[in-house]
Image (spheres, rainbow, N blue to C red):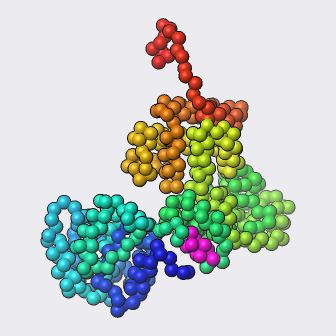
Amino acid sequence: MASLKSFAATDRFVTEIASPASLRPGYVLIGDEVFLYDRCRKAVLAALAPEDTRDFCLHDLDLAETSIFEVLDRAQTPSLMAPFQVLFVRNLKTLYGRGSKKEEFAAIDAYFRSPNPQALILFIADHLRIPTDLRKMDYQDKERYEKIRETLGDWCGIVELARVEESDAIRWVTATAESRNVKFDPDAARELVDSLGADMMLIASEFEKLLLYVSAPIQPGAPSFAQFAKGGVSSEARPLSTPLPESITSPGGVVHQVNEIAGADVRDMDAVRVAPNQYAIGDQAAKERATHSQPVLARNRVTLGDVETMVLAAKQRSLYELTDAISAKDRPRALLLLHGLLNASDGGEDAAIGHLYMLARTFRQMLIISEKNVRDSRAIWQVLWQGFRMPPFAAEDLIKQARRYKSRRELTRAIRLVARADLELRSSPANKLLVLERLILDLSTEPKPTTYEPSHQFAMEL
């Protein structure tokens, strides 16, 4: 794979680790990009901590629980069971908390003036966020970064685990897939990276799931896991006498062998392919078809449709397109997007309550954005708490949609309409689609002013 700009710092670190002559006594891994940190850790373990002695030479320490004096003492003391010591030290921010910490930094300075050549200390500063463009780094993070460089930069190598650029992430996806004999369409790679906000850890996880989805051989006539869930397989099936190493139990209580499920999310029904030659089917004709059929070769190609089917964040994109049409009062487009959303869902109309939940959540986010007068996507993370934030790709769109509503009353009206539709759906209506269509039409219509006539029951009406 060609060298990518976003991976340059970790590539240099991996090269230094592999060469004992250029190895420094300590390094500081700065940044919260978990994917790059995991890459650095794997390189260190492969080069300096072989598996047969890893229990004796690898130390994962936390400065919130272990003092820096004990860390340095462990690094200075040679091990009788392993020739080299590797120490990963987390929570570096505790060294830069309240107080001068003169004794701690004096001990660090004394150790690195005469370090143990058979030990490596890696400080992890994952409390800092380094953006792709260093000029956009938060002022507080920049101050902390400079303090680390001033105190540890003279003795330790600085490895920046910055956020990966979208273009580099796309190239990584296509190149890695090609190295594993799978073609990843450019549109699919762009959609995967864009929908996950260039978060490499999420991208790598979804990437593995997509490769499993397209590379698993498909058996002609073999039911998928979705068919088991819907009762498409005879409940008279009998398990084989041989034990199954990996299995799934259908709603009917039948155990079925799964073909290469490692790393897949079983909630993604089409990601799981059941091999019919691994279990007994009650239907004799189906059993004969399974015995004589040959597996169809996997297509080994990831398309845009595969990403939209398998990746949850890509599914959410259509939801934000729906709220965009609603806020723009574009009723025809909103209805088309609603039908597209239902057709793309595994459960169709049965997934309507889940869509209503996401609609209510989105309108609540817009209400907070409107009340806090948020104008910039960087300020969103300050007003929306952890667990209530939208994907990064939707931040700008949601701000624009929130600004289309003139008052708080319009947004609270939308939330009340969603709540009323939710109540109707839970009351077993004759037609769920009709309830959803009426909701979308109401949300896409300008609210009419309500005039109250004087009455003796004004308090109850209020």
The quarter of the displayed image where residue 66 is located: bottom left
> Is residue 172 in the magenta section?
yes
Q: Nearer the viewer, residue 127 or 44?
A: 127
Q: Position of residue 38 (x, y in %)?
A: 44, 72
Q: Is residue 59 visible?
A: no
Q: Position of residue 70 (x, y in %)?
A: 21, 74
> Is residue 120 in the magenta section?
no
Residue 321 shown left or right of residue 74 in the figure: right
Q: Residue furthest top?
A: 456
Q: Residue at x 64, y 64 (%)?
A: 188
Q: Residue at x 57, y 72 (%)?
A: 171
Q: Is residue 442 visible?
A: yes
292, above or below 456, in the image? below
Q: Residue at x 42, y 45 (%)?
A: 374
Q: Residue furthest bottom?
A: 21
Q: Position of residue 355 (x, y in %)?
A: 60, 43
394, above or below 441, in the image? below
4, above or below 358, in the image? below
Q: Specify the quadrant that holds the N terminus.
A: bottom right
The quarter of the displayed image where residue 154 is located: bottom left
Q: Name the dominant secondary structure of the magenta segment.
A: helix
Residue numbers of the magenta segment: 170-178
Q: Nearer the viewer, residue 207 or 12?
A: 12
Residue 56 shown left or right of residue 163 in the figure: left
Q: Position of residue 142 (x, y in %)?
A: 31, 64
Q: How many marks do you count on the picture?
A: 0
Q: Residue at x 77, y 71 (%)?
A: 295
